[in-house]
Amino acid sequence: MRRHQSDVDADQRCSDRLETHFQGRIVRRIVGFDEAIERGVDPDNPEEPETFGVQDYVNKRTGEVSRVPVGVDPGWATNPGKTRMKAAADFLVGKIDAMDENMRRIAVEDLAGSWLMKRIQSGEIPYRPGDPEPANVARGQIEAPIAVLPADLAEAIGAKSRVVRFSVATAQKQLEPEKGRLHFTPKDYEKAQKLIDRGEVLRADERTIVIQGVIDGAPWTIVIRRAESKPDEVRLVSLSRNPERRLKARREKGDIIRQGEEE
Protein backbone atom coordinates (compact mmCIF):
# COMPACT_ATOMS: atom_id res chain seq x y z
CA MET A 1 0.00 0.00 0.00
CA ARG A 2 1.36 3.43 -0.93
CA ARG A 3 1.90 5.67 2.06
CA HIS A 4 0.02 8.96 2.35
CA GLN A 5 1.96 11.92 0.95
CA SER A 6 1.95 13.64 4.35
CA ASP A 7 3.86 10.69 5.83
CA VAL A 8 6.41 10.84 3.02
CA ASP A 9 6.78 14.60 3.54
CA ALA A 10 7.30 14.04 7.26
CA ASP A 11 10.05 11.51 6.54
CA GLN A 12 11.69 14.00 4.18
CA ARG A 13 11.60 16.78 6.78
CA CYS A 14 13.10 14.44 9.35
CA SER A 15 15.85 13.32 6.93
CA ASP A 16 16.68 16.90 5.94
CA ARG A 17 16.75 18.00 9.57
CA LEU A 18 19.16 15.26 10.57
CA GLU A 19 21.48 15.99 7.65
CA THR A 20 21.40 19.74 8.38
CA HIS A 21 22.03 19.06 12.07
CA PHE A 22 25.13 16.97 11.48
CA GLN A 23 26.36 19.26 8.70
CA GLY A 24 26.26 22.12 11.21
CA ARG A 25 28.35 20.15 13.69
CA ILE A 26 30.88 19.31 10.96
CA VAL A 27 31.22 23.00 10.00
CA ARG A 28 31.89 23.90 13.65
CA ARG A 29 34.55 21.19 13.89
CA ILE A 30 36.31 22.22 10.66
CA VAL A 31 36.24 26.05 10.68
CA GLY A 32 36.40 26.67 14.42
CA PHE A 33 34.15 28.24 17.02
CA ASP A 34 34.51 31.94 16.05
CA GLU A 35 34.22 31.38 12.32
CA ALA A 36 31.22 29.12 12.87
CA ILE A 37 29.45 32.07 14.51
CA GLU A 38 30.42 34.33 11.59
CA ARG A 39 28.95 31.78 9.19
CA GLY A 40 25.66 31.71 11.06
CA VAL A 41 26.02 28.47 13.04
CA ASP A 42 24.84 29.07 16.59
CA PRO A 43 27.23 27.03 18.81
CA ASP A 44 24.49 26.61 21.42
CA ASN A 45 21.82 25.60 18.92
CA PRO A 46 23.38 23.74 15.98
CA GLU A 47 20.13 22.03 15.03
CA GLU A 48 19.06 24.90 12.75
CA PRO A 49 22.24 26.28 11.09
CA GLU A 50 22.16 28.32 7.95
CA THR A 51 22.96 26.53 4.74
CA PHE A 52 26.00 27.90 2.90
CA GLY A 53 25.26 26.47 -0.52
CA VAL A 54 27.26 23.93 -2.50
CA GLN A 55 30.37 24.14 -4.65
CA ASP A 56 32.23 22.01 -7.19
CA TYR A 57 35.00 19.73 -5.93
CA VAL A 58 37.47 18.14 -8.36
CA ASN A 59 39.07 14.87 -7.28
CA LYS A 60 42.76 15.36 -8.12
CA ARG A 61 43.33 11.63 -8.60
CA THR A 62 40.36 10.74 -10.81
CA GLY A 63 39.31 14.13 -12.19
CA GLU A 64 35.72 13.45 -11.08
CA VAL A 65 33.69 16.58 -10.31
CA SER A 66 31.17 16.45 -7.45
CA ARG A 67 29.05 18.97 -5.56
CA VAL A 68 29.74 19.39 -1.85
CA PRO A 69 28.48 21.83 0.81
CA VAL A 70 30.57 24.98 1.20
CA GLY A 71 32.91 24.70 4.19
CA VAL A 72 32.63 20.91 4.42
CA ASP A 73 35.49 18.62 3.47
CA PRO A 74 34.44 16.28 0.61
CA GLY A 75 35.17 13.29 2.82
CA TRP A 76 32.32 14.39 5.10
CA ALA A 77 29.90 15.31 2.32
CA THR A 78 28.08 11.99 2.05
CA ASN A 79 26.01 9.96 4.45
CA PRO A 80 28.19 6.92 5.33
CA GLY A 81 25.13 4.74 5.95
CA LYS A 82 23.83 5.38 2.43
CA THR A 83 27.32 4.90 0.98
CA ARG A 84 27.46 1.53 2.70
CA MET A 85 24.11 0.61 1.10
CA LYS A 86 25.64 1.20 -2.36
CA ALA A 87 28.67 -0.89 -1.43
CA ALA A 88 26.37 -3.62 -0.09
CA ALA A 89 24.46 -3.68 -3.39
CA ASP A 90 27.72 -4.10 -5.31
CA PHE A 91 28.80 -6.88 -2.96
CA LEU A 92 25.43 -8.65 -3.26
CA VAL A 93 25.45 -8.49 -7.06
CA GLY A 94 28.96 -9.95 -7.10
CA LYS A 95 27.85 -12.89 -4.98
CA ILE A 96 24.81 -13.54 -7.18
CA ASP A 97 26.91 -13.41 -10.35
CA ALA A 98 29.12 -16.14 -8.86
CA MET A 99 26.15 -18.52 -8.44
CA ASP A 100 25.08 -21.14 -10.95
CA GLU A 101 22.19 -20.36 -13.30
CA ASN A 102 19.42 -21.89 -11.20
CA MET A 103 20.54 -20.37 -7.90
CA ARG A 104 21.01 -16.98 -9.56
CA ARG A 105 17.41 -16.95 -10.75
CA ILE A 106 16.08 -18.00 -7.34
CA ALA A 107 18.13 -15.38 -5.52
CA VAL A 108 17.04 -12.54 -7.79
CA GLU A 109 13.39 -13.58 -7.67
CA ASP A 110 13.53 -13.41 -3.87
CA LEU A 111 15.27 -10.02 -3.89
CA ALA A 112 12.89 -8.62 -6.52
CA GLY A 113 10.08 -9.18 -4.02
CA SER A 114 11.98 -7.85 -0.99
CA TRP A 115 10.85 -4.97 1.23
CA LEU A 116 13.66 -2.78 -0.16
CA MET A 117 12.60 -3.33 -3.76
CA LYS A 118 8.98 -2.60 -2.87
CA ARG A 119 10.03 0.69 -1.25
CA ILE A 120 12.12 1.57 -4.29
CA GLN A 121 9.27 0.79 -6.70
CA SER A 122 6.64 2.61 -4.65
CA GLY A 123 8.62 5.85 -4.48
CA GLU A 124 8.65 5.85 -0.67
CA ILE A 125 12.39 6.59 -0.40
CA PRO A 126 12.72 10.41 -0.48
CA TYR A 127 14.52 11.60 -3.61
CA ARG A 128 14.45 14.89 -5.51
CA PRO A 129 15.43 14.50 -9.19
CA GLY A 130 17.96 17.11 -10.31
CA ASP A 131 18.99 18.11 -6.77
CA PRO A 132 22.83 17.84 -6.55
CA GLU A 133 22.85 17.76 -2.74
CA PRO A 134 25.15 14.80 -1.88
CA ALA A 135 22.76 12.97 0.46
CA ASN A 136 19.96 13.25 -2.11
CA VAL A 137 22.22 11.87 -4.85
CA ALA A 138 23.14 8.99 -2.53
CA ARG A 139 19.45 8.19 -1.98
CA GLY A 140 18.90 8.09 -5.73
CA GLN A 141 21.68 5.50 -6.05
CA ILE A 142 20.04 3.05 -3.65
CA GLU A 143 19.24 -0.03 -5.73
CA ALA A 144 18.47 -3.73 -5.66
CA PRO A 145 18.47 -6.66 -8.13
CA ILE A 146 15.28 -6.95 -10.19
CA ALA A 147 16.09 -9.43 -13.00
CA VAL A 148 18.74 -11.65 -14.61
CA LEU A 149 20.09 -11.47 -18.16
CA PRO A 150 21.02 -14.57 -20.16
CA ALA A 151 24.69 -14.76 -21.08
CA ASP A 152 24.16 -13.78 -24.73
CA LEU A 153 22.32 -10.55 -23.88
CA ALA A 154 24.91 -9.58 -21.27
CA GLU A 155 27.60 -10.14 -23.90
CA ALA A 156 25.64 -8.08 -26.43
CA ILE A 157 26.01 -4.94 -24.29
CA GLY A 158 29.52 -5.71 -23.07
CA ALA A 159 28.39 -6.44 -19.51
CA LYS A 160 30.39 -8.54 -17.07
CA SER A 161 27.40 -8.87 -14.73
CA ARG A 162 24.22 -10.81 -15.46
CA VAL A 163 22.25 -9.11 -12.68
CA VAL A 164 19.94 -6.22 -13.62
CA ARG A 165 19.54 -3.53 -10.96
CA PHE A 166 16.74 -1.04 -10.33
CA SER A 167 17.39 2.25 -8.51
CA VAL A 168 15.46 4.89 -6.58
CA ALA A 169 16.34 7.49 -9.23
CA THR A 170 14.90 5.35 -12.02
CA ALA A 171 11.77 4.57 -10.01
CA GLN A 172 11.13 8.29 -9.63
CA LYS A 173 11.19 8.71 -13.42
CA GLN A 174 8.22 6.32 -13.57
CA LEU A 175 6.07 8.79 -11.60
CA GLU A 176 3.28 10.74 -13.27
CA PRO A 177 4.09 14.40 -12.49
CA GLU A 178 0.51 15.55 -13.13
CA LYS A 179 -1.09 13.13 -10.67
CA GLY A 180 1.79 12.39 -8.34
CA ARG A 181 1.26 8.65 -8.46
CA LEU A 182 2.96 5.66 -10.03
CA HIS A 183 2.44 4.53 -13.59
CA PHE A 184 2.90 0.94 -12.45
CA THR A 185 2.52 -1.27 -9.42
CA PRO A 186 5.32 -3.47 -8.05
CA LYS A 187 3.49 -6.39 -9.70
CA ASP A 188 4.03 -4.78 -13.10
CA TYR A 189 7.79 -4.83 -12.63
CA GLU A 190 7.67 -8.63 -12.63
CA LYS A 191 7.11 -8.33 -16.37
CA ALA A 192 10.74 -7.25 -16.77
CA GLN A 193 12.01 -10.81 -16.28
CA LYS A 194 9.28 -12.23 -18.52
CA LEU A 195 10.33 -9.86 -21.31
CA ILE A 196 13.99 -10.75 -20.82
CA ASP A 197 13.11 -14.45 -21.09
CA ARG A 198 10.97 -14.35 -24.22
CA GLY A 199 10.67 -10.82 -25.63
CA GLU A 200 12.02 -9.44 -28.87
CA VAL A 201 15.45 -7.83 -28.31
CA LEU A 202 16.70 -4.84 -30.30
CA ARG A 203 20.00 -3.04 -30.01
CA ALA A 204 19.78 0.67 -29.24
CA ASP A 205 23.54 1.26 -28.94
CA GLU A 206 26.64 -0.61 -27.82
CA ARG A 207 25.56 -0.69 -24.18
CA THR A 208 21.76 -0.52 -24.43
CA ILE A 209 19.08 -3.01 -25.49
CA VAL A 210 15.33 -2.57 -25.89
CA ILE A 211 13.17 -5.61 -25.17
CA GLN A 212 9.52 -5.64 -26.20
CA GLY A 213 6.65 -8.06 -26.37
CA VAL A 214 3.11 -8.89 -25.32
CA ILE A 215 2.83 -9.99 -21.68
CA ASP A 216 -0.51 -10.96 -20.14
CA GLY A 217 -2.29 -9.65 -23.22
CA ALA A 218 -0.70 -6.19 -23.22
CA PRO A 219 2.33 -4.76 -25.10
CA TRP A 220 5.28 -3.88 -22.83
CA THR A 221 8.77 -2.49 -23.37
CA ILE A 222 11.84 -2.31 -21.14
CA VAL A 223 15.22 -0.67 -21.67
CA ILE A 224 18.35 -2.19 -20.11
CA ARG A 225 21.66 -0.34 -20.09
CA ARG A 226 25.20 -1.09 -19.00
CA ALA A 227 26.98 1.70 -17.10
CA GLU A 228 29.36 3.53 -19.41
CA SER A 229 32.57 2.94 -17.45
CA LYS A 230 31.45 0.05 -15.22
CA PRO A 231 30.75 -3.19 -17.12
CA ASP A 232 29.70 -4.91 -13.89
CA GLU A 233 26.73 -2.53 -13.44
CA VAL A 234 23.60 -3.21 -15.52
CA ARG A 235 20.31 -1.42 -14.88
CA LEU A 236 16.68 -1.38 -15.88
CA VAL A 237 16.26 2.25 -16.94
CA SER A 238 12.69 2.18 -18.29
CA LEU A 239 9.47 0.17 -18.18
CA SER A 240 6.58 1.26 -20.39
CA ARG A 241 3.39 0.15 -22.10
CA ASN A 242 3.26 0.95 -25.82
CA PRO A 243 0.64 0.38 -28.52
CA GLU A 244 1.49 -2.59 -30.70
CA ARG A 245 2.02 -0.24 -33.63
CA ARG A 246 4.94 1.29 -31.68
CA LEU A 247 6.43 -2.16 -31.22
CA LYS A 248 6.09 -2.82 -34.94
CA ALA A 249 7.64 0.53 -35.90
CA ARG A 250 10.56 -0.05 -33.55
CA ARG A 251 11.05 -3.53 -34.99
CA GLU A 252 11.24 -2.18 -38.54
CA LYS A 253 13.86 0.42 -37.64
CA GLY A 254 15.89 -1.47 -35.05
CA ASP A 255 18.80 -3.91 -35.10
CA ILE A 256 17.13 -7.16 -33.99
CA ILE A 257 19.32 -9.33 -31.77
CA ARG A 258 16.69 -11.93 -30.93
CA GLN A 259 13.23 -12.74 -32.22
CA GLY A 260 10.48 -12.78 -29.63
CA GLU A 261 8.36 -15.75 -28.67
CA GLU A 262 4.59 -15.74 -29.02
CA GLU A 263 2.67 -15.54 -25.74
Image: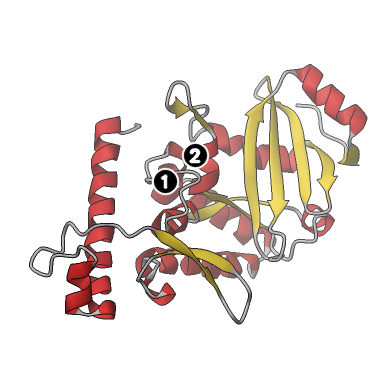
The answer to which quarter of the image holds residue 212 is top right
The residue sitting at 60% across, 60% down in the picture is 103
Indicate left or right for 138 with 228 as reference: left
The answer to which quarter of the image holds residue 203 is top right
The first of marks 1 and 2 along the sequence is 1
Indicate left or right for 189 with 177 as reference: right
Q: Secondary structure at mark 1?
A: loop
Q: Position of residue 234 (x, y in %)?
A: 66, 56
Q: Position of residue 38 (x, y in %)?
A: 21, 68
Depth check, front residue: 174 or 60? 60
Depth check, front residue: 144 or 111? 144
Q: Position of residue 110 (x, y in %)?
A: 50, 51
The residue sitting at 86% across, 23% down in the picture is 249
Q: Amino acid at mark 2?
A: Gln
Q: Amino acid at mark 1?
A: Tyr
Q: Residue furthest left?
A: 44
From the viewer's perspective, is residue 32 above or below residue 261?
below
Quarter in which the C terminus is drawn: top right
The residue sitting at 83% across, 53% down in the picture is 206
Depth check, front residue: 165 or 126? 126
Give the numbered dot on residue 172: 2
The residue sitting at 56% across, 76% down in the picture is 59
Q: CA distance from mark 1 to mark 2?
A: 8 Å
- Mark 1 and mark 2 residues within 8 Å of each other at the beta carbon: yes
Q: Residue furthest front?
A: 38
Quarter in which the N terminus is drawn: top left
Q: Secondary structure at mark 2?
A: helix
Give the numbered dot on residue 127: 1
